[in-house]
Image (cartoon, coloured by chain):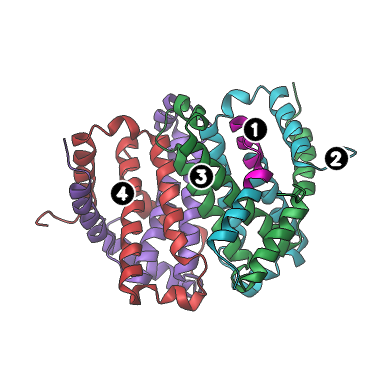
Chain colours: A purple, B red, C green, D cyan
Amino acid sequence: MSDELTVPELQRRLAEFAAARNWQPFHTPKNLASALTVEAGELLEVFQWLTPEQAGAVMADPDTAHRVRDEVADVLAYLLQLCTVLEVDPLRALAEKIERNESRFPAP
Amino acid sequence: MSDELTVPELQRRLAEFAAARNWQPFHTPKNLASALTVEAGELLEVFQWLTPEQAGAVMADPDTAHRVRDEVADVLAYLLQLCTVLEVDPLRALAEKIERNESRFPAP
Amino acid sequence: MSDELTVPELQRRLAEFAAARNWQPFHTPKNLASALTVEAGELLEVFQWLTPEQAGAVMADPDTAHRVRDEVADVLAYLLQLCTVLEVDPLRALAEKIERNESRFPAP
Amino acid sequence: MSDELTVPELQRRLAEFAAARNWQPFHTPKNLASALTVEAGELLEVFQWLTPEQAGAVMADPDTAHRVRDEVADVLAYLLQLCTVLEVDPLRALAEKIERNESRFPAP
């Protein structure tokens, strides 16, 4: 893994991966937003029957830890691909949201 | 917005924001995974009744474009906060997933 | 509310409601499955930051109780409308699933 | 399947099923609302990459039709179990919502 780990670089690799498999026709905003929600559900599934204490310890089990990283990757993959097709800069969107929240929820 | 737009920097700002409001007790893995799914649903809501063509044009309307960026930010915020509490590196998780998918779905 | 409270009767009323507003073109299986997921997320939102104890007491507060009943209704409405367009009998599907689960998870 | 197919009867069978396996401690409102959302996502997954036309024809394929009925059953099971623990009458909640919507969205 010599490639740089940045959001734009990962977006480029995801686009290249989809293009090489002719998957772009499936990657409409609506389909990608659906897939994002489905994957978020799969990530939540890891935690759904656990007590708060058990949920806090999921990374101690190597199989569950792998599953968590795998589902985090799927959620991020669809979020970044959605941002690519909509031309949204996800990091800028988040930075601006944090600023709006700083006014909306002033720290005590 | 002089701060650098990187994932670790945004994770730092989100943690600082939550700490300043004493929100950390709510930010359990289970709650954050729930919130991530809820926000993914809110993002999908933008597209749910649209035709594929209408869904492709959402960014042309300034209000809808703002709503999309706002929901993208919320999804990313909860994903990054979940990664912080679980000590998962989201960009590395995605890079490793892309590599596994390259073996799993060989390009034609 | 003189109408009988049964699933087929509610499906009939939902179909009539949508037809009177010319909403059927929007009620494709894909759109209804999206709307179902979005509404399930809105129901989960009621509980997402609550402790298990607080979540168990949501019906004690009249406003939250109203919100819960409202979101339950939305989830059920989209599930029943999806069943109508796909010609799935939801109660039969559930009865058959319970029977399969009785073999799959034998009681101790 | 001699049992009557009504919502209260299915709620009784689901409660009996859970009690026989000592699953009630897991069936908190928060966990059931999470499971409902996860299953709604699994139902949406059937449709996520399909065109509207393909999505309209899912029941023509016996395997996909079985998968759809299975996921519909899972969504309904968790919705009914959530209603049982919260003492919400799902059919009444829906009938009341339809009435509210009749005022909110008057037919043309």
| Chain under callout 4 | B
Residue type for callout 1: Thr
Name the mark on residue C43: 3
Residue B9 seen in render: no
Residue type for callout 3: Leu
Q: Are marks 1 and 3 on the same chain?
A: no
Residue located 73% across and 29% down the image: D17
Q: In what element is the residue under mark 1?
A: helix
Residue type for callout 4: Ala
Give x and y (percent) for residue D95.
Answer: 66, 50
Q: In what element is the residue under mark 4?
A: helix
Name the mark on residue D84: 1
Direction from residue B27 to residue D108 in the image, left or right: right
First to last magenta residue range: D79-94
Mark 1 to mark 3 CA distance (whole Å): 15 Å
Give the class, few, some or many, for how many residues have Cα within 10 Å of label 1's Cα (few <14, many ≥20): some
Q: Nearer the viewer, mark 4 or mark 1?
A: 1
Give x and y (percent) for residue B107.
Answer: 48, 69
Q: In what element is the residue under mark 2?
A: loop
**Residue at the extreme left:** B2
- Which residue corresponds to mark 2? D4
User: Relative to residue D6, is residue A79 depicted above or below?
Assistant: below
Give x and y (percent) for residue B31.
Answer: 40, 37
| Chain under callout 3 | C
Residue D85 versus residue B1: which sits nearer the camera?
Answer: D85
